[in-house]
Image (cartoon, grey):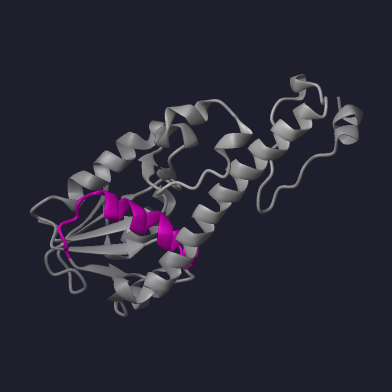
Amino acid sequence: MASVLIISEKPSQAQKLSSPYGGKKEKDCYLISPCSTFPEGARVVWCVGHIMELAAAKDYDEQYKEWKLEHLPIIPEFKLNIVADKRGVFNNIKKYVNSPETKEIINSGDPAREGQLLVDEVILATNYKKKPVKRLWTTSLTASAVKKAFSNLKDNREYLPLYFEAVSRQQSDWLVGINASRCVTLLMQQKGVDSSYGAFSLGRVLRLFPLFMREKWK
């Protein structure tokens, strides 16, 4: 019996969260036997970084497979896909989220906006049936810090502003990257830039790599 499901950001984090409670490594989780903190036991599973990603432009409309200025700006109603090579990880988490045995879920992602987003977007994609979700918040994974954090859980809804901040960053990066990269690439080609250079990538933290530098580093 394990009525609490703890979703961590990565395998090493799962091990450190379960260790203070004598967690035993199973094939796809760490299992914590009933104890004072978890009277009905707990199970710790893990992501492997982001296992959800915003859909590619072509997933919204087949016409976006071809780059054309008249398509810009592309502003979709965003949807998430499971990263192709991480579907097994997602399915493992989903299995336990939707298990009748699970009565409570704990988001134990890193204490920052990306950690909040990384786990929240997985929970939301699993059809978690409105099971209560708590939030573990700790900057240290020592045994004493982990125990203290589990004794001070908060409702995950208190971190919604952090989640929405991360979503805004995620979606704005997509909008800037997709539209700016396509626009600049197409305009450069119109000006006679050799298409063999390929696409020119631009984004919030990525600026155009000057042509003369490309030539220098060939």
Nearer to me, 30 or 53: 53
Task: Decide: is 41 above or below 94.
Answer: below
Nearer to me, 29 or 57: 57
Residue positioned 41% across, 65% down in the render: 163
Nearer to me, 46 or 30: 46
Relative to 213, is 67 on the left or the right? left
Horizontal and vertical percent position of residue 196: 75, 19
User: Can residue 123 be found in the magenta stretch?
Assistant: yes
Residue positioned 14% across, 64% down in the render: 34
Horizontal and vertical percent position of residue 136: 35, 70
Horizontal and vertical percent position of residue 63: 48, 28
User: Can residue 203 be found in the magenta stretch?
Assistant: no
Task: Decide: is 105 above or below 159.
Answer: above
Provide the residue span drawn in magenta.
110-131
Relative to 7, is 177 on the left or the right? right
Task: Decide: is 19 above or below 155.
Answer: above
The answer, for residue 141, to whether it is visible in the render is no
Quadrant of the image occupied by residue 89: top left
Relative to 63, is 88 on the left or the right? left
Nearer to me, 129 or 150: 129
